[in-house]
């Protein structure tokens, strides 16, 4: 394989963008393991009393990831997130104003490999969410597993990440006075196994739990499509029924975490590595769907709103695809 090396004379700003990207990829691929190892070493050291105190804190604080987390505006406004945004770059597009008197459930599509657009737009202030949607506070829902990792949980909560448990979403959507925006990557971990350039297949047909939540709490639904999310990484071929896909599906069911075998570019060369390609991400926030509160929705109620949501998501995609290089004959496929 011919290796394409990065040029030696690269502007400092691009180097800083790459450094910010390395920090982010490390955060989600290795930082959790580093934090866990650090906690174990602390337990085995002469400073074990600190580990014991922190373990007590973990027990007392165990419900925080399901009760809105512990966000930090300072962390969300770090300069490094500006470089992270500019690496791709990431752009947030508003379709209409959102009334902050309501609570909202944002359905984020597609999941992609590492949900880069979701993190950049909703866990940092780099793309200007607070200025674009004044009065709304976004929370990106993440698998509960990650909030059990010592130290790492504090880092991810500071950006606005919260547990994806039903109780967590219910807490946000039931807050009086409105102004809460729970962001769910609806396709979940399984959808990441199909995330590759050109993919337009979304796992949505059987995903109705978020619809039921919206009905129970009267939260307005907002379809969000992130153009470019699937263009960031290549992935080993793993068609349904293949040996690799069977192993991945089994591990996903056992662990709750998908393990896509992805690759893209490196730091000093463009031929292989775990850094994403520099592909523009355009995250379009669609028009809200008004939802009347229904504490005990029937199957027909859920199905009707689910159909309406899929139509709204399709509309967001069809109205914007020509702006972002998607051919006219390409359409979303729901499975």
Image (cartoon, rainbow, N blue to C red):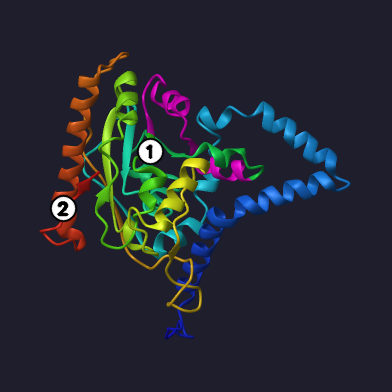
From where the camera sits, is residue 160 visible?
Answer: no
Give the quarter of the image for residue 224. top left
Question: Between 277 and 40, which is closer to the camera in this rendering?
Answer: 40
Give the residue displayed 23% in from the left and 34% down from the top: 288
Q: Mark 1, residues whose alpha carbon is within 10 Å: few (<14), some, or many (≥20)?
A: many
Q: Quadrant of the N terminus?
A: bottom left
Could you say where residue 88 lies in the image, as x and y percent from the top left?
A: 37, 64
Residue named by callout 1: 183
Residue 149, by quadrant, is: top right
Q: Earlier in the sequence, mark 2 or mark 1?
A: 1
Relative image position of residue 191 (x, y in whole percent) = 35, 48
The quarter of the displayed image where residue 140 is located? top left
Residue 325, image x and y in percent? 19, 63
Residue for point 42% across, 28% down: 169
* Residue 12 magenta: no
Judged from this view, the residue extending furthest toward the top is: 296
Along the viewing direction, whichever of 79 and 305 lies nearer the viewer: 305
The residue range painted magenta reads 152-181
Q: Indicate the position of residue 108 as horizontal and vertical percent values.
A: 33, 43
Give neighbour class at mark 2: few <14, some 14-19, many 20+ (Cα, 10 Å): some
Q: Is residue 150 visible?
A: yes
Q: CA distance from mark 2 to mark 1?
A: 24 Å
Q: Is residue 86 above or below residue 134?
A: below
The quadrant of the picture occupied by the C terminus is top left
Tag 1 secondary structure: strand
Q: Which mark is residue 309?
A: none
- Which element is circle 2 on? loop
Q: Which residue is mark 2?
A: 331
Direction left: furthest residue: 329
């Amino acid at each position: 394989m011919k290796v394409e090396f990065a040029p030696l004379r690269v502007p400092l700003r691009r180097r800083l963008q790459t450094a910010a990207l390395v920090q982010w990829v490390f955060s989600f691929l290795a930082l959790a393991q580093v934090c866990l190892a650090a906690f174990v070493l602390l337990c085995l050291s002469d400073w074990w009393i600190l580990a014991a105190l922190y373990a007590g804190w973990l027990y007392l604080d165990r419900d925080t990831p399901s009760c809105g987390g512990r966000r930090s505006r300072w962390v969300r406004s770090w300069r490094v997130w500006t470089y992270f945004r500019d690496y791709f770059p990431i752009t947030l597009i508003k379709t209409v104003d959102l009334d902050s008197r309501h609570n909202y459930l944002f359905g984020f599509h597609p999941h992609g490999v590492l949900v880069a657009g979701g993190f950049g737009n909703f866990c940092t202030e780099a793309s200007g969410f607070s200025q674009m949607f004044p009065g709304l506070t976004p929370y990106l829902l993440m698998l509960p597993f990650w909030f059990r990792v010592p130290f790492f949980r504090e880092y991810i909560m500071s950006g606005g990440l919260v547990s994806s448990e039903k109780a967590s979403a219910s807490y946000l959507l039931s807050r009086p006075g409105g102004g809460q925006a729970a962001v769910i990557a609806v396709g979940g971990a399984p959808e990441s196994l199909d995330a590759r350039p050109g993919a337009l297949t979304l796992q949505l047909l059987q995903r109705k739990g978020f619809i039921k939540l919206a009905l129970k709490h009267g939260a307005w639904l907002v379809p969000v499509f992130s153009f470019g999310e699937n263009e960031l990484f290549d992935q080993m071929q793993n068609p349904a029924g293949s040996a690799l896909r069977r192993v991945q599906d089994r591990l996903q069911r056992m662990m709750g975490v998908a393990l896509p075998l992805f690759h893209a570019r490196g730091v000093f060369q463009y031929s292989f590595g775990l850094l994403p390609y520099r592909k523009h991400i355009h995250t379009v926030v669609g028009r809200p769907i008004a939802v009347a509160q229904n504490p005990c929705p029937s199957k027909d109620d859920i199905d009707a709103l689910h159909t309406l949501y899929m139509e709204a998501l399709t509309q967001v995609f069809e109205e914007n695809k020509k702006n972002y290089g998607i051919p006219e004959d390409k359409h979303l496929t729901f499975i």
